[in-house]
Amino acid sequence: MTVNSTLEIVDIQTGERTALITFDYLIEAPNWTSDGKRLIYNSQGRLYSFDIATSESTVIDSNYATQCNNDHVLSPDNSQIAISHHTKEDGKSRIYILPLEGGEPVLVTPKAPSYLHGWSPNGAELAYCAERKGQYDIYTIPVGGGAEVQLTDTPGLDDGPEYSPDGQYIWFNSVRTGLMQVWRMRADGSEQTQMTFDESNNWFPHVSPDGEAVAYLSYRKGDVAPGDHPANKNVEIRWMASTGGEYRTLVQLFGGQGTINVNSWSPDSKQLAFVSYQVKE
């Protein structure tokens, strides 16, 4: 299935959607830069910087890392970007760091597969999902490399770990209670707490920069297996307070994989960037 991709933003308060640009090929996973001027996305293994004012995209030179997936995260000071790149040797995803303006990647996780999702607010650690011994759990590792620390240990999939802005919590999603649901734990892995309880499969919780809200992606129950997050499905982007409770639907769209795999909140916490898709005739 081939698609067009529309890079959009939605106003959190009004729900108004604004289409920024449509590409006649697949793009995924926008990160909003902290100056509010750019969106970083991936396409065909490369990273791109989209200038919101001019609607121009520029490729980011990632040297040999040309098999990047949609797991990329900006450093807190926005000087660097961490990526998940599928290495030539075995085709498995490993995490690297390079300058945001381009440069040579530095390997952080020798073990694979490792799928990046979070960068701690103090800049010291990365959080990621990794398969080790046949089980997918959540780990952290120093940005300079070193020993990884396992935070979850449950059968099935734990995925999408992302720090709260104060660094106290890591939000993630887990199938441990049947459907995929949003969870939260302390940054050391303690106090693992379920935060959504509805009859949907909920993925990729992203905490707003002000710490007040969480946006996440929801698939209809029965449309997908709880542990799958495929493309080209009717999905919703939902909002809830970071303290938990009732959600409200921000956007209904055709999307899924690639829509909001990474944190795409605007720096003022008033908008969210995402990608919707249209099947080509």
Image (tube, helix red, strand yellow):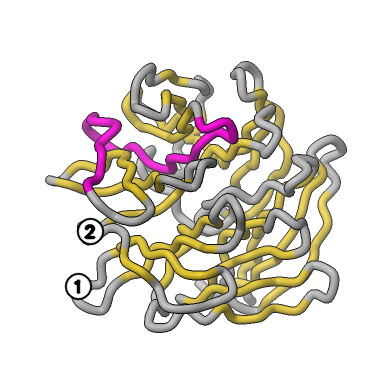
Magenta-span inclusion, residue 154: yes
Residue at 45% over, 27% down: 183
Name the residue nearer the viewer: 220 or 241: 241
Earlier sequence position, callout 1 versus callout 2: 1
The residue tagged 1 is 90
Magenta span:
147-167
Q: Is residue 186 above or below residue 95?
A: above
- Percent position of residue 224, x then y: 43, 44
Name the quadrant containing residue 160: top left
Q: Main secondary structure of the magenta part?
A: loop
Q: Dot 1 surroundings within 10 Å: few (below 14), some, or many (20 or more)?
A: few
- Percent position of residue 96, x then y: 37, 65
Q: Dot 2 surroundings within 10 Å: few (below 14), some, or many (20 or more)?
A: some
Relative to 41, is 107 on the left or the right? left
Magenta-span inclusion, residue 281: no
Q: Is residue 60 above or below residue 154?
A: below
Name the quadrant containing residue 175: top left
